[in-house]
Structure formats: C-alpha cells, structure tokens
Amino acid sequence: MFQLTFDEARQLRERFGTPLMVVSRREIAEKFSILSDYLPGVHIYYAVKANAHPNILEVVKQNTDRFDVCSAREILAVKNVGVDAANMIHTNPIKKPEDIRFAVDQGVNWFVFDNECELEKFRPYGKDINLMLRLSFPNTDCVVNLSYKYGVPAEQAADLVMKATGMGLTVRGLCFHVGSQNLNPYKYTGAIAECKRVFNYLALQGIYLDYLDIGGGFPVEYIESIMPLRNFFTPIQEALDSYFPSTTIIAEPGRFIVGDAANLILTVVGKSKRNNVWWYYVDDGVYGSFSGRLYDHCDYSIITDREGPREQCIIAGPTCDSFDVIYHNSIMPHLEAGDVLIALSMGAYTTCSASHFNGFPPARTIVVD
Ligand SMILES: Cc1ncc(COP(=O)(O)O)c(C=O)c1O
C-alpha cells in the first residue's frame, strides 16, 4: 500500500497546499502487474467511475488502453487521454436513447442491458453493436451491493438473450458485478458457474456467447486487513479455467486499481474542546474527499506523526454544516492547528463524489512516481 512519509507530506503541502490527493504511479502499475500475474489472460477495463481525474486516467492509460464507461462525460474524459472509443465498454444498464446515440457516434460499440425496455433502444443499431446481459448475484459479503439496482436473475437470462436475438440484435456475452469491496472470492466462482449454465442452455438453442465479464469488486486494504491476494484470485482463475477455457474474459476493476494508490494530505485548521471532547477541524470533509464515508460506506485510516497519549476525539470537515463530521469517535494523540494528517487508501470513490459545497473545492490531485 502506498504511504507517504510525513517529511514528504510536509514538502508537498509546502508546494501545493492542502487538501492534496497524492497518487502513486508505481502503485497503480503494481496493481496491473498483480492482475496480470493472478488473472492472466483476463482483459482489464478500468472502471472510470472510481476516479475519473485526468491525471489518473493518464496513468491508467500507461497500463491498459481499455476502459469501462457509463456516461457521455466519461467517454469524453477517456477520449481526452487518447483512448479509442472502440476500446471502451459502456456498462450502464439503463441509458437515455440520446446517450446511446452519443456513445455510438463517438465509436463505442459494446453496451450492457438487463431488461426488455432497454433492448428497444438498441433496435436502430441492429448488428452494429455488441450487447452483454447483466445478471444479478446479491451478496452480503461486500461493502456495496451492486445487484440491488441492476441485473436479472440467472433463470431469466436465457429468455432475454433469445428476445434480443429475435430482434436482430447481437448478444455476445454475460456480465455481473458481485459487489464492490467484495471480500469473498467464492461469490465470483458461484456466479461464474451460474453463467456457464446460461451459456450451455443458450448453446442448445443455437446461440453461442463468446464473452464473460466478471465485473469489478476486487478489494483493497482499508482499516481492516484483507486475505492475501493470491488466495483471493486463485479460485477465480481456477473457475474461469474450468468453466470458460475458450471464452474471452473481461474484468472492470475500479477500486482495486486506484483505491490504495492515493494518500490525502490534510491540515488541522483549528481545535475546540466541547463537552470535554476535543474536536479537530480539518480542511477536507464529507462534502469533499470523505464523501466516500457516505456513498461508499468506507472507513479510512487517518494518521499523524504526533506522539503522546491517544484520546477519543472528533474529526470534522471545513464546511459550516454540523453533518460535516468525518469521525465522531476517533482516537488520536493531542493535535494542534497547523498539523499535517495523512488519510490512506483514498483513491477510489472519494474525490469523484466531492462537491463544492460552502465554497470549498475538491482536493487537488497530483501524481508522483
Ligand atoms: C458495472 C460496474 N463495473 C465496475 C465497477 C467497479 O467496481 P469496483 O470499483 O468495485 O471494482 C462498478 C462499480 O460500481 C460497476 O457498477
């Protein structure tokens, strides 16, 4: 995991100010190398939603030219770093017809659907586009369940594929997302086995699928440790080898690529003792990079180099809303205004959901080696 020293953090603060999101190019490259070791042959599409900052897209592009996009802006952002739209897959299952038109005009030709209504929107494009059907696999072992809003149960999949085929559309494969920050590799193996059953059933009807997209969800280490990555990925690769030896396999990780590649440098702006508890006010909060506390249900580790007895404290953001509290119950040595803090593993689902509320702009992002 990427971790700046406090000397480095102070130097960067001197130069760029805070809040400052510092992204490690090396850590992102390392994530791609882990994926190519443990999931060899799987085509990796970076899920842009995790962090669409242009500097990050540039770094990701040095490692893959395949991207998972969900909106017109994401398509343009990825094109801006020189990626051919033919290398993008549009994974948003529900789109406006004009968004599909825009994507197709830009050159995107892979799309996801999970219902009949959506299929109608693809009718004008006939065989010019490739479709994948999203299946749902509800999961309680992940932090963000992504089968609540999207995906059809496996038992309904074949009917929908046959309907699409009957409309003259080309369904190339199945996709699923077992949930983000998923800690259980067997959720993938179960889903892969279910998908095989659907592939087999369709083959008996004369429809041959040749793509399987296993989504994202690979975990990173936040406060709690995760299982060794080899143990996590091995069962997934084994399931792919045994069920899908000759199918093209896609994965769309977001968090795994950027999550622990970024540190957020913060400054303590002020402090106040209220009801006998120290409150520390820092220069980024839940309306900013710590929006992931809400939307991503994530706990980030915030560290200091101060020493001394640790005591219960409250860490709050800079806006004037009482809701803007990062931690109601943190444990820290006594801090002073002007102190530097570092929040770890802040790369995914943080700045991308930050707002400008109360005039505080999202943290600046820089890339270091
Ligand atoms: C369709 C799709 N693909 C990929 C991702 C990326 O997931 P993760 O960041 O957990 O790897 C998401 C996350 O919401 C998603 O919805």
Image (spheres, rainbow, N blue to C red):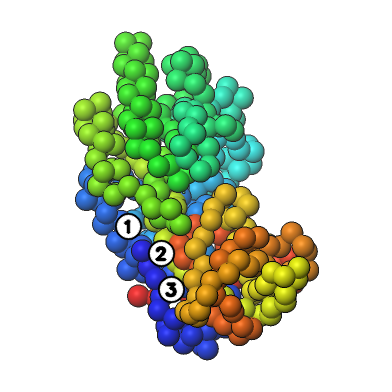
Q: Secondary structure at mark 1?
A: helix
Q: CA distance from mark 2 to mark 3?
A: 10 Å
Q: CA distance from mark 2 to mark 1?
A: 9 Å
Q: Earlier in the sequence, mark 3 or mark 1?
A: 1
The answer to whether any part of residue 79 appears in the image is no
**Front disc: 2 or 3:** 2
Q: Is residue 147 above or below residue 271?
A: above
Picture quadrant where residue 16 is located: bottom right
Residue 261 numbered mark, or none: 2
* Cβ atoms at labels 2 and 1 below 8 Å apart: yes
Residue at coordinates 37% horizontally, 49% vertically from top-left? 226
Residue 31 numbered mark, or none: 1
Closer to us: 141 or 295:
141
Q: Quadrant of the N terminus?
A: bottom left
The answer to whether any part of residue 310 appears in the image is yes
Q: Secondary structure at mark 2?
A: helix
Residue indicated by mark 3: 367
